Image: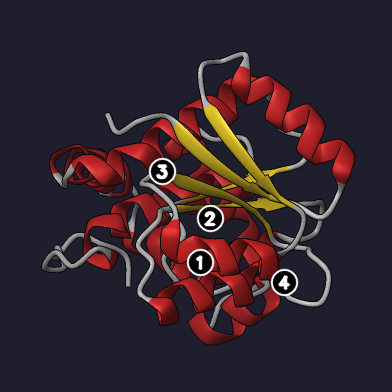
Amino acid sequence: MAEKRVYLVDDEAAVRRSVGFMLKTSGFEVESFESGEAFLKAAPHLAPGCVLLDVRLGAMDGLAVQQALKDKGVVLPVIIITGHGDVGLAVRAMKAGAVDFLEKPFEKTAVIASLEQALRHNDGRAELNRLADQARAQLNGLTPRERDVLNGLVEGQSNKVIAYDLGISPRTVEIHRANLMSKLGVGSLSDALKIAFTARMADLAGAAPAASEPA
């Protein structure tokens, strides 16, 4: 795995202190930034690592920072930090290439696992492809209709919009949603979305699409 270096971008000093301390005591090298602008100024000169990026910053939010990194040609895997109600923003970030997102408050084990996965992006594609294949295998256990519902959720659609598009009732969408989450072994929409996006990760990084991947 690449050196355990993390760039923490959050405009709350308390978060930078607490998360920074947690990561340093877990063996990570941490460099913190109080704004997206400050991080972007330094980004072209940073050593390989990964970015822990709050989606709710000041003048420049996390999505804008993520896009600016791309525009600058800076290749650093990004993990988005979101608050309650920001799942829609996290979906947009994942579609733009973020490797994961974490909802506040998050547990230490979840942060460490997410960072280790992100850092593997710097070591090549073998592990990335393995994780994507594993996620695709989980999705293959869904029925076509459950996959349709999951695809709608990935696009950020509400149950009512999904129901309208599929010509079924919102109640039926709720049933399919509950069933797919049960089959995937997850307890939240966030975790279901992560599996769907993990299945796409290799393709976002430039691999050929797989036929079993959700549209």
Towards the viewer: 96 or 176: 96
Residue identified by numbered label 2: 176
Q: Which mark is residue 61?
A: 4
Q: Position of residue 133 (x, y in %)?
A: 19, 44
Residue identified by numbered label 3: 49
Amino acid type at circle 2 is His
Asked if marks 2 and 1 touch (Cβ < 8 Å), the reply is no
Residue identified by numbered label 1: 154
Is the residue 86 above or below the residue 108 in the image? below
Quarter holding the N terminus? top left
Determine the CA span between mark 3 and mark 1. 27 Å
Which sits earlier in the primary sequence, circle 3 or circle 4?
Answer: 3
Give the class, few, some or many, for how many residues have Cα within 10 Å of label 4's Cα (few <14, many ≥20): some
Which secondary structure, mark 2? Answer: helix
Q: Which-is-in-front pick, marks 3 and 4? A: 3
Q: Which-is-in-front pick, marks 2 and 1? A: 1
Which sits earlier in the primary sequence, circle 2 or circle 1?
Answer: 1
Give the class, few, some or many, for how many residues have Cα within 10 Å of label 3's Cα (few <14, many ≥20): many
Q: Position of residue 122 (x, y in %)?
A: 27, 45
Q: Which-is-in-front pick, marks 2 and 3? A: 3
Determine the CA span between mark 2 and mark 3. 39 Å
Amino acid type at circle 3 is Gly
Q: Is residue 84 visible?
A: yes
Give the class, few, some or many, for how many residues have Cα within 10 Å of label 1's Cα (few <14, many ≥20): many
Q: Residue at x 41, y 47 (%)?
A: 195
Is the residue 43 above or below the residue 64 in the image? above
Which sits earlier in the primary sequence, circle 3 or circle 1?
Answer: 3
Figure quadrant of residue 170: bottom right
Which sits earlier in the primary sequence, circle 2 or circle 3?
Answer: 3
Quarter holding the C terminus? bottom left
Q: Position of residue 45 (x, y in %)?
A: 43, 59
Determine the CA span between mark 4 and mark 1. 21 Å
